[in-house]
Image: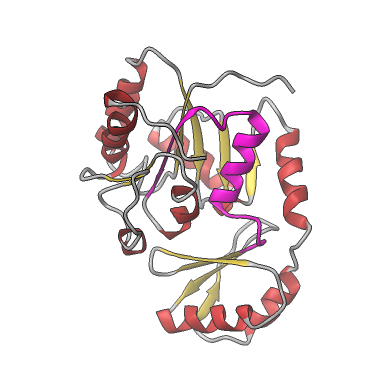
Amino acid sequence: MKRENVTHLLATDLDGTLVGEKELTSLLFDYYKERPYNVQLVYVTGRHYASTMELIKEEELPMPSILISDVGTEMYDLNDPELHERWKKTLEEKWNPADISRIVQSCSGLTPQSIPSVHRLSYFAESDEAVEEVKQKLSGSSVPHKLIFSSGRDVDILPPNAGKGEALSFLLREKGWEKANVLVAGDSGNDRDMITLGYPAVVVGNCQKELKQLPDHPMIFRAQKHCAGGIHEAWEHFFEKTPVKNSI
């Protein structure tokens, strides 16, 4: 596989981050067009593939180089179709959805979501107590898993080595992009593990409360502006004033 030389990369969530205020999204991409370098786009979303494609069309977004969907359990690269299979193989090693479903069914206050992904079990939670119950029961079992709670209602249970952060790390290693100028952007709890990877990251101004509780860190920029406006703020903070090196 030929490795592309990438100097700058935006790895961003979509809903509430890149997408949410259309004028700010347009201004961000106009800004990128004016840069003397190319910005590689990686979309990292909780949406499934078909839903993401619909959103890209509706919002007139540029197609990304890579799409990481389903909270980091699916990965697509049109120039490297085998990337998806390589990532899928790593997830299958410790994934036992039948046992997880059995445990979740013994809990109250969780409604299954219909998600077309084999490496993700998703639920709507009626309360924080429902989330705590399933966390405790899964933690007390011997079943490997990763539980992510976001936006005050969404519960995703994934393979233990899945999630947006693990997927992004895998991608950057596979492509040889670890040393690029990477900005990670997000607004909710399922973005937490990629925001805390050690690359320059932005929590947009309209973020959910779970990200407001993140401890301060020099590699995490708390934007004042919402959605893509916050990405624009952070890009200038990290790369246009005094460029920073990631801590990876």
Q: Residue lying farthest top?
A: 36
Q: Residue lying farthest left?
A: 224
Asked where in the image residue 115 lies, by quadrant, the reply is bottom right
Q: Residue at x 48, y 71 (%)?
A: 124
For residue 153: magenta?
A: no
Residue 106 screen position, x and y as percent: 62, 87
In this rendering, the answer to whether 133 lies above or below 1 is: below
Q: Bounds of the magenta span?
A: 158-186
For residue 185: magenta?
A: yes
Asked where in the image residue 119 lies, by quadrant, the reply is bottom right
Residue 220 in the figure: left or right of residue 99: left
Q: Residue at x 35, y 50 (%)?
A: 217
Residue 127 screen position, x and y as percent: 41, 80
Asked whether the viewer can see residue 70, the reply is yes
Residue 227 in the figure: left or right of residue 78: left
Q: Residue at x 43, y 60 (%)?
A: 189
Q: What sort of colour scheme is used for the picture? A: secondary structure
Residue 117 screen position, x and y as percent: 66, 56
Q: Nearer the viewer, residue 243 or 39?
A: 243
Q: Nearer the viewer, residue 66 or 241?
A: 241
Total numbered labels placed on residues in the image: 0
Asked whether the viewer can see residue 127, the reply is no
Q: Residue at x 36, y 17 (%)?
A: 33
